[in-house]
Amino acid sequence: MSKPKKACGAVGQIVGQLVKITGCYVVGSVGSDKKVNLLKHKFGFNDAFNYKKKLDLEAALKRCFPQGINMYFDNVGGTTLDAVLPNMRLGERITFEKEIAEYLKEEKVIYMEDVAEGLDAAPEALVGLFTGRNIGKQLVAVAQE
């Protein structure tokens, strides 16, 4: 099981950018000022805040979304979700990363990985990235658990 990530993790970066492309106002919650800067200046988020500095997350969200939050992608839960709930607009949507995992499990969404076995296969796997041979995410399995 992976540790939860905020907006600057791999999933948060992509979700934020995709939602921004559709014209949404996007705010990210991250754990450092460096990551705030990345979200705003590299990934194009409208705003971001360091949740470690904001003692009152609910108030911080209220300032970012005075009319209420239309959509929230939750890949953390806990205190972040607790702060989001009172700020949600009535009838709007919260998507949970767990939902996506269920879609994958139920094969409603199909995801492929290209797994090369062993470190000896790593150079060929890397070449495959540049020649378009891989399908989906290219991984190299170095050990079996």
Image: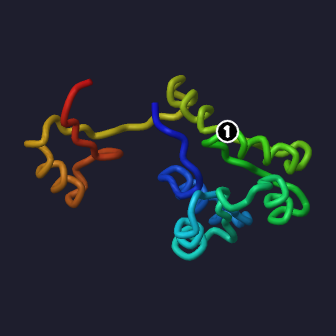
- Residue 10 lies, in percent from the top left, at 47, 52
- The picture places residue 44, in percent across and down from the top left corner, at 59, 71
Q: Is residue 109 above or below residue 22?
A: above
For the point 84% across and 65% down, the residue is 63
**Residue at the extreme bottom of the image, as rendered:** 41
Left or right, 36 with reference to 26: left
**The C terminus lies in quadrant:** top left
Amino acid, disc 1: Gly
Considering depth in this image, is 37 or 25 the residue closer to the camera? Answer: 37
Depicted 36 relative to depicted 70: above or below: below
Residue appearing at x 59%, y 55% in the figure = 7
What residue is shown with label 1? 77
Position in image of residue 19 (x %, y %): 65, 59
The kind of secondary structure element at disc 1 is: loop
Pick whichever, 124 or 57, lies toward us. Answer: 57
Residue pictured at 86% horizontal, 59% vertical:
62
95 above or below 45?
above
Q: Is residue 39 left or right of residue 70?
A: left
